[in-house]
Amino acid sequence: MTKMKKTFILLFSLFLAFSTYAETKKEIKAYETAVLLMNEGKYKEAIPILKDLIRNNKEYIAPSWTLADLYGRMNNDEKKIATLIYIAKPNMPNYAATLLRLGKAYHETCNYEKAMETYKTISPSDATFYKRAQIGIKQCEDALEFVAKPVPFHYKNMGNNINTEFDDYWPSITADGSFFSTTVKLNKRQGESEFGKGVHEDIFISQKANGAWDKIKNVGRAMNTIGNEGAQSISLDGRYMFFVACDRTSGFGGCDIYYSIREGDSWTPAINAGSPVNSRHWETYPTLSPTGDELYFASDRPGGVGKSDIWKVKVSIQKDGYLKFSDPVNLGPVVNTKEDDFSPFIHADNQTLYYSSKGMKGLGGYDIYVTYKDGKGGWTTPQNMGYPINTCRDEFGFVVNAFGDKAYYASDGQEKNGRGKEIYELDLTEGNLLPAKKMKFATGKIVDATTNQPIQATIDVFSVETNRVVFRSVSDKKTGDFISCVPENEEYGVNVNKKGYLFYSDNFAAKKPMKLKTPDGKESNSVKMDKIEVGKKMTLRNIFFDFDKATLKKQSFIELNHVVQFMKENPTVKIQLSGHTDYKGSAEYNMTLSADRAKAALEYLAKKGVPRERMEYKGYGKTQPIADNSTEEGRALNRRTEIMIIAK
């Protein structure tokens, strides 16, 4: 954001300082005027001044270089190259420097062969420029390798409901594909200066209705100001919007990371993420992990590998939905290079990281790369996403939906339709650089069982096999809505808790849709939570025993740990742990087995510090079925462990 603008202004300062031949004071003054006009976004007024300088003093090279750069800013590559060709002659001053610029101009239009031809014209006697030309030649050779092996590439423009008449970029989408956000550079059209009157970045949002996107709209004052806000990223469940704002009085540095919490149709006022996320340096491009416990971002702070690196911090979601951050970690030299690495996006599978870099083998400018967690705390060697996803220009802001079959990105070169940067949807189904895991999601509403009023509660989804949390968030404070997202081929448990209420437990089977269930196993769109009252019950759906035994499986531990936490948060509550079986086997056998299983759960809780005097256990055998014992699904529901409040 702002960093690029400062670079743009600095560029003209360098031009201004480059004076080698006999320019008159009048010419220098005219050149200064042209540069000032450019910095003010008055391109049309600057062009005739520069042309006049070029016409009257051919040895004054700076105006030609500046005019060429100006045409580039106006997306007129043909005139940019023609301007450089005009002065790329052996008898002209700074011949090697002009050749280098001309080679880069060809390179930036994907004319790799012409770029190499130009680079090779630079003599070894011009050591500095020759060395940089050799780098350019190698980059072109690398690019041609990618061009020779194109990847499947099917895209579509997202249309006028997402794209505006201005530059649109930084797409972001929720897990259920119902909520979309972008950054819009208001009052900036193709070929116009980003320093024009009223030009600034704002965050825009759109929601899907009846299968189509609503007209995108400004998110409003909660996040946007007359300054620049953008590079936003919405969390998978749509609960949090992270974004970057620059030069605010509440900031730690030039550009800081902020977040806002969604409450119904509105957002809380922006909250500075604070230290250690933000520093006096440059922080940007935040993306929250699906587990809700890590935030990835880019920063040029000290301690990194290159100019700008990918970092992450630990995140703790509080009961009220606000966030705490700690323990910043650089992703290290496998991911980061000596150049700029930025625009990270961690996929819903929490295994796949997409980001942009210009420090590795690519096609020119910033390319998109993908890397995967290696299972050992590190990352695999990043892979270039290939051509034509990557081109000779800059590619960044690449995000992938939860299912992993579609990506979203911005480009000003796909259609060359004169509308500047627009958002595109890319089909990934034929690619070989897909996310590591396929995902599925559940949506629902959390309400008070008695009043049916929405509740803001904490949602944890955990792997039954590993006991590790894979998704964490809070429900909407105003509506109770929530979304959870997990890999589709594994079994998961879910825990919903709110102080003063019995917690909700559920289980999502592998390879089946995620559907919420009532206590008797019927599908439901809502989680009804009971306040803590004597006689109220809750079913622990993630308690597992060895077949025909009362031995707890390790997969039960995280569920039982939730009970431990519940007992700590409610120190006066007393409970009965009850065991239940299906109808198979004798009544006496089932009564004994169910009692032994309830006792095993109690013993685990006691070892974790829950006082025995606050617990009792009882086996009910097959006397209290909640489902039809004639089906396997019904019998599975009847085999259960329950908690009943016996004192509060």
Image: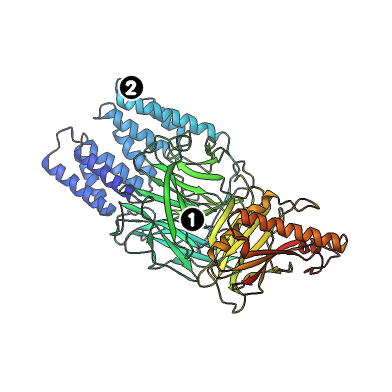
Residue extending furthest toward the left: 25
| Quadrant into which the C terminus falls | bottom right
- When the figure is inspected, residue 371 is found, relative to residue 593, above or below; the finding is above
The percent position of residue 398, horizontal first and vertical second, equals 50, 49
The percent position of residue 335, horizontal first and vertical second, equals 47, 38
**Nearer-the-camera pick, 111 or 456:** 456
Mark 1 crowdedness (10 Å alpha carbons): few <14, some 14-19, many ≥20? many
The percent position of residue 151, horizontal first and vertical second, equals 59, 40
Distance from Cα at disc 1 to Cα at disc 2: 44 Å
Q: Which residue is mark 2?
A: 123
Q: Element at badge 2? A: loop
Image side of residue 301 versus residue 619, left or right = left
- When the figure is inspected, residue 514 is found, relative to residue 266, above or below; the finding is above
Q: Amino acid at mark 1?
A: Pro
**Nearer-the-camera pick, 601 or 276:** 601
> What's the residue at 58%, 52% (across, down)?
469
Q: In this figure, which colouring scheme has been used for the structure?
A: rainbow
Image side of residue 37 versus residue 504, left or right = left
Q: Sequence order check: which comes first, mark 1 or mark 2?
A: 2
Q: How many marks?
A: 2
Snapshot quadrant of residue 594: bottom right
- When the figure is inspected, residue 92 is found, relative to residue 550, above or below; the finding is above
Q: Which residue is mark 1?
A: 171
> What's the residue at 62%, 41% (across, down)?
432
Q: Evaluate whether residue 440 shows in this view.
A: no
Image side of residue 508 versus residue 258, left or right = right
> What's the residue at 51%, 55% (across, down)?
292
The percent position of residue 161, horizontal first and vertical second, equals 51, 64
Residue extending furthest toward the front: 613
